[in-house]
Image (cartoon, rainbow, N blue to C red):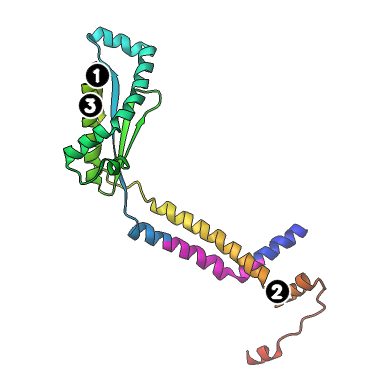
Amino acid sequence: MEEEIELRQYWEMLQKRWIIVVVLPLIAALTSGIISYFVIKPVYQASTTLIVGKKASEEGQAAVQMLDNSVLLANQQLAKTYAAIAQSRTVEQSVIEDLDLPMTVGELDKLITITPVKTTEILEIKVTNNNPELATAIANSMASEFSKSVIAIKKVDSVSIVDTAVIPDKPVKPNKMLNILIAFVVGLMASVGLVFMVEYLDNTIKTSNDVENVLGIPVLGVIPNYEAGKQG
């Protein structure tokens, strides 16, 4: 019974200050939408994949190698090693020169993520940029320059480009609808908290329920507002 009374009191608090509960989340969502759509620059991501392996002198040898788990494991370790090589200063400098990019190696490095795909011999190169065409060009150039570097380092290893990067048509950031939803939920939580805080700080008595809750005495009767009734 006491729990029902408390829930009813909370509901009455929210009803009494419903404007705060409604307006604050809407303002938060609207602000987030404006920032997401008109302030934050969209970020695009282009990706390419490569497969790293050992060359075989004969076709039969290659077939055996494909079934050999030890070779597969060795190639997976090779992919991890080559992930570091792909993002080396030498390769990135070659990409800058190839595309004539107006940036330093450090600036380019921040745009690139190279990840070995688990339990495979595959490397995935991802490039993010505000310009989708530039992100695509960098990804493809990274794959090309990396392949050249690997061949120069050790000719018995092969790197094949599985998928070339294509120009992305949609940005990966910002996620506009998710930002708006999060802002609305945060605004709703903040508005409820604000209502409870205002109610806690407000020690004035306005209704018969306030008399019972604040003073702890029963209400014997209510005197109507004669003047208000007369004006109505």
Picture residue at 40% right of the left edge, 23% below the top: 119
Disc 3 from disc 1: Cα separation: 9 Å
> Would you say 42 lies left or right of 1 here?
left
State yes or no: residue 156 in magenta. no
Quickly name the residue at label 1.
Answer: 154
Residue 208 seen in render: yes
Asked if labels 1 and 3 touch by Cβ distance under 8 angstroms, the answer is no
Residue type at the position of mark 1: Lys
Q: Residue 133 is drawn in which quadrant?
A: top left
Nearer to us of marks 3 and 2 is 3
Inspect this view and state whether residue 166 appears: no
For the N terminus, the image quarter is bottom right
Residue 131 pos. (x, y %): 25, 48
Q: Is residue 21 above or below residue 44?
A: below
Q: Nearer the viewer, mark 1 or mark 2?
A: 1
Q: Earlier in the sequence, mark 3 or mark 2?
A: 3
Give the CA distance from mark 3 to mark 2: 75 Å
What is the distance, in whole Å, between disc 1 and disc 2 at their CAs? 80 Å
Identify the mark at residue 203; answer none if there is no mark. 2
Element assignment for label 1: loop
| Mark 1 / mark 2, whichever is N-terminal | 1
Image coordinates for residue 219, horizontal then vertical, percent: 80, 76
The residue labelled by disc 3 is 149
**Crowd class of label 3 (few under 14; some 14 to 19; many from 20; radius 10 Å):** some
In magenta, the rendered stretch is 12-31
From the viewer's side, name the closer residue of 224 and 146: 146
Task: Tell me if 99 is positioned left or right of 78 in this view.
Answer: left
Snapshot quadrant of residue 66: top left
Does the magenta stretch mainly form a helix, a strand or a loop? helix
Label 2 sits on what residue type? Asn
- Image point 27% across, 42% down: which residue? 108
| Disc marking residue 145 | none
